[in-house]
Amino acid sequence: MDADVIIIGSGAGGGTLARALAPSGLSILILERGDYLPRELANWDAETVFNTHRYHTDEQWLDGAGKSFTPVTGYHVGGNTKFYGAAILRRRLADFSVRRHVDGETPSWPIGYDDLAPYYAQAEDWYFAHGQAGTDPTEPPRAAYPYPPLVHEPRIQGIYTALRAQGLHPFALPLALHRDDTHPARSPCIRCNTCDGFPCRLHAKGDAEVCGVAPALAHANVRLLTGTRVTRLIAGPEQRVVALEADGPDGARRFQARVFVLAAGAVNSAALLLRSRDAAHPSGLANASGQVGRNYMCHLNSACIAIDPRRDNPTVFQKTLAINDFYAHSGDADFPYPLGHIQNLGKVTPEILRAQRPYFPRALCRWAARHSVDWWLTTEDLPDPENRVTLAADQSIQQHYRPNNEAAHRRLCTRWKTVLHRLGFPLVFFQRMDIRAVAHQAGTLRFGADPMQSVFDPDCRSHELDNLYVADASFMPSISAVNPSLTIMANALRVADILHRRLAGAA
Ligand SMILES: Cc1cc2nc3c(=O)[nH]c(=O)nc-3n(C[C@H](O)[C@H](O)[C@H](O)COP(=O)(O)OP(=O)(O)OC[C@H]3O[C@@H](n4cnc5c(N)ncnc54)[C@H](O)[C@@H]3O)c2cc1C
């Protein structure tokens, strides 16, 4: 036996799970295909991050039509939280029940908000959550945040006030940053403009390496093997996983454990089960229901640049404000459906614009960035069994995705444009994200009570394989319209408790 528990992947789910299990004394082995992301000057270079993609994979995936694309995702210790914008929001109460949308209904979850609430609180504590309870009208019941909200810089504070004057309810975006605004000189986070989408060179972002893996490795019973890509799980005759195969620095080898936990991210965890097919499981492991890989979701996302040519925006750390006034309901009698969530983007700089649009003249990038305030708009996409991960003939990943709920997203953009016009921004531009934007991937191995409609049970244990669990974004039956990470972390903590109860006393 190589370990009591093997965790495949060290991101939001895997890293948090490892830290939670560490004090149990159980032997924990984390297998991570990537390496530590190097701390170097280039971490903060927009050209390196967004154009030459030094930290992203160069893997090719196929879309539904068989056309290849490079997903914007990375393989490192800490997973995609190395790049995340650190916006950590709890799902809303209604996100756990059936919700009507313009294009259909989202399913209810087998657990409710109350089941996750204590784990949300624990995750917020570990990940340095800053925020202010009681200011977001859609917020579920909660106690105070562990840390106060980040202070808005003057331009954003002005927008906050002007939004309030429009009758809206802007609030401080909850953020996972190691920051103390009252003692800036002693604060690890320096509120720079290379946070959202960039790795943090200072390790001041609450990512899964800093807040999950590193504290876990402080315990002697936890080990991490980097550069070790799990290629296959092997099932035995008794409805159990008996081993896995991985390619590591010393070549291919097998690992055995009492329990195996998938935490490779929604796309890779599903692909791994599909690649693990054998004679007894011809359509992949844990896939008698045919549900593995289905119901992929990733949000409808748009970046928005609002320009007021008469005013400069000198803000450095811009990602401090959010709006949920259109989250549950559009407010329009002819469209009684949810629209989504809006938050600031990290401040767009000339370098970021130029890296993402190399054909834009430099002067235009400088001008636009000088006057812009930047936003990120998210609408829930609904689970659709035909939106799915499959394997191509050469075993590479094929991602079939046709967006739905688009009328809601268009309305969210139109509504926000009207608000921005009233705020004095005559020029408002939107950019919809395409299939390469897999940042918020979720839902390919959903949990549920019905073994024919889900892959994992409400405890996140496989309906078919007694010792196989999931702890990444793939367990979600619906994605909601808020960012996914905090829910992944909270659920990983819940899974840790379940595993602890199961394995307790054996360490
Ligand atoms: C630019 C960007 C900005 C984002 N901003 C936000 C934000 O502000 N707020 C938010 O909530 N979310 C944000 N996200 C999304 C967030 O990062 C993800 O939702 C989250 O990291 C997913 O957690 P996970 O555990 O499912 O997967 P990941 O964190 O991706 O971890 C999966 C891990 O598994 C490893 N792995 C994959 N395959 C294998 C294999 N076969 N063998 C071994 N290891 C494997 C990977 O290398 C990786 O370390 C952002 C993402 C990006 C890219």
Image (spheres, grey):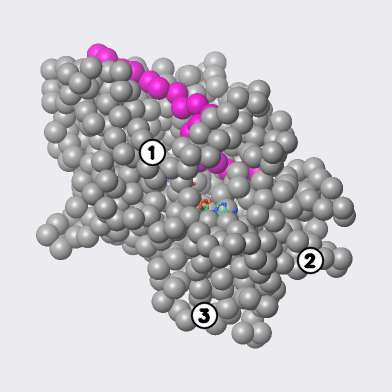
One can see residue 68 in this view: yes
Q: Earlier in the sequence, mark 2 or mark 3?
A: 3
Q: Residue at x 60, y 47 (%)?
A: 268
Q: Give me the C-alpha separation between circle 3 and circle 1.
A: 35 Å
Where residue 41 appears, as percent x and y from the top left, is: 23, 49
One can see residue 330 in this view: no
Query: Considering the numbered disc 3 on the image, is that residue within a helix, a strand or a loop?
Result: loop
Which quarter of the rendering shows the C terminus? Answer: bottom right
Q: Vertical placement of 224 versus 375: above or below?
A: below
For badge 2, the amino acid type reads Arg
Q: Earlier in the sequence, mark 3 or mark 1?
A: 1
| Residue pointed to by mark 3 | 221
Q: Along the horizontal axis of the image, is 416 left or right of 166? A: right
For badge 1, the amino acid type reads His
Query: Considering the numbered disc 2 on the image, is that residue within a helix, a strand or a loop?
Result: loop
Which quarter of the rendering shows the N terminus? Answer: bottom right
| Residue pointed to by mark 2 | 240
For badge 3, the amino acid type reads Asn
Q: Residues within 10 Å of mark 3 (few under 14, many from 20)?
A: some
What residue range appears in magenta?
Answer: 424-444
Q: Give me the C-alpha separation between circle 2 and circle 1.
A: 39 Å
Of 150 and 39, the residue lying toward us? 39
Q: Residues within 10 Å of mark 2 (few under 14, many from 20)?
A: some
Query: Considering the numbered disc 1 on the image, is that residue within a helix, a strand or a loop?
Result: loop
Residue 399: mark:
none
Q: Residue furthest front?
A: 250
| Residue pointed to by mark 1 | 53
Q: Along the horizontal axis of the image, is 506 left or right of 482? A: right
Q: Residue at x 41, y 17 (%)?
A: 414
Q: Vertical placement of 359 versus 31: above or below?
A: above
